[in-house]
Image (cartoon, grey):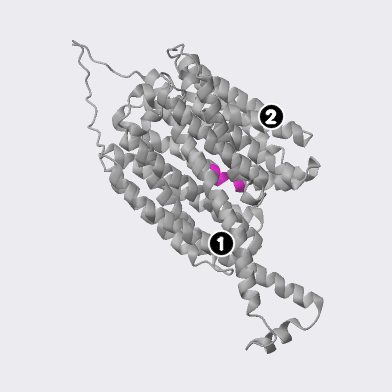
Amino acid sequence: MSTTVATHREVANRGLLVVSVMLATLMQALDTTIANVALPNMQGTLSATQDQVSWVLTSYIVAAAIATPATGWLASVMGRRRLLLIAISGFTVASVLCGMATSIGAMVAFRLLQGLFGAALVPLSQSTLLDVYPREKHGAAMALWGMGVMIGPILGPPLGGWLTEAYSWHWVFLINVPIGALALFGVAASLPTDDTHQTRFDWRGFAFLAIGIGALQLFLDRGEQQDWFGSVEIRIEAALAFLGFYLYAVHWKFSPRPFLDLGLFADRNFLASNLFIFVLGVVLFATMALLPPFLQGLMNYPVVSTGLLLAPRGIGTLIAMMIVGRLLARGADARVLAGIGMLLTAFSLWQMMHFNLEVPQHLIVTSGMIQGLGLGLVFVPISTVAYSTLPMSARTEAAGIFSLMRNIGSSVGISVVMTLLSRNTQLNHAEIASRLTPFGDNAAQIAATVGHSAGGLAALNGEVTRQASGIAFLNDFWLMMVMTLAAIPLLLLLRPVRHAMAPAVVADH
């Protein structure tokens, strides 16, 4: 009988690896939102139209979505270490090229390249942490990984706004250089070389899935700009999305080695976790898309102040992840923790439903902190349970699907809330304006306030639009609260997973 004892070098290497993959995850997660606030500045510098500059975001989202499912196959052929090093290097170089772009065409091309390289970072970092930690510590590992995934999008807008105001928009991309360099050297020094398996690439399956995912992302991202099904472009994208997914489903059914194994969804924990992460993606990114324009556009907060008001949301997430990782390691039921998190998230959205255009700062901070706590309590248990009943060999491929579902959820969430925001603002404006007539009970008050000048009428119309938009924001918060509560019964699909403490001695016979 022999005893297996971890050396100091192994422990140190694991710590270095954790920090390195977290930096890579944070870098990719930051870039999903950091460029948003810099778009107006880019538009002027690159001499682009509003529609052209929107492709800076669209190209990145579409490229990352198409490339994410290929992570499992690439890792098996190239090895996880080599693929992670290539992804970090490529993402960092593409970031430099984005920061140096002098035309809108070059910027879109470099963002496309950035999305292609960045697609593998999140699923690879997740599967790597799951492998280097024993099963009973997977909760703690997912808490560490989740910090990068959840904090990155939250920090993106305020950090991007500060960099743009203090320096220039170029720095929202160039900031990736030191982060990428540290992640690259850390992974190279700590992640050992792994085995590779030469398998045939399913080009037909990849093509079907790429068409479906790419068309769906374009449909969601450009639908609001193009008036949805009133546009020929949107109808074509919807048809291509349906056709691509349908053809892939048929191809998977009859192919002996499909590109992406949809059979993983037969695992109940994995299926329910993907549904949960979809809803979480909707709530997380939709709320982040709504709060900055609410605070800046309706309440006239500057960019830096908006970032400071939203920062407690990230602090709440960090606190929750530190707590939940330890609770899972001690055998806490992941379903109970996730249920508490969903209720906290729903409560924070209920608070946001009662915002008005003079909402005090402490309520913005409190609701954000509670929502951060809730999202953190949900994200870690769901990320842990998702892989608990899957074989180790399927982790990288499953992580790619998991990340893809989160990304699609974010695209759906942003698309839906922005569409409803625009349409409800118009409806609310018409409803409020219909009550402001020269014959109503408030006619004398309106006449005294506005007078009969064109400027007075314009000011009145501006205030009506502001109030109508404020109501539309509250309608969106209500919708997300209902969606969050409706997702709670999905917890019943999850099988309880409790890990026994690992033995201190491993016997070899």
Residue 233 in which image quadrant: top right
The amino acid pointed to by label 1 is Phe
Sooner in the amino-acid sequence: mark 1 or mark 2:
2
Measured along the vertical axis of the image, is residue 75 above or below residue 274?
A: above
Q: Position of residue 212 (x, y in %)?
A: 54, 34
- Give the amino acid type for the residue marked by disc 2 in the picture: Val
Residue 332's tag is none
Q: Residue at x 66, y 68 (%)?
A: 465
Q: Quick one: SS at disc 1? A: helix
Which residue corresponds to mark 2?
A: 96
Picture layout, residue 478 above or below residue 113: below
Residue picked out by circle 1: 473
Choose between 269 and 98: the one closer to the eye. Answer: 269
Quarter of the image with the N terminus is: top left
Residue 46 relative to residue 418: left or right? right
Q: Is residue 28 visible?
A: no
Q: Residues within 10 Å of mark 1 (few under 14, many from 20)?
A: many
Q: Main SS of the magenta segment?
A: helix
Q: Say whether residue 220 is magenta.
A: no
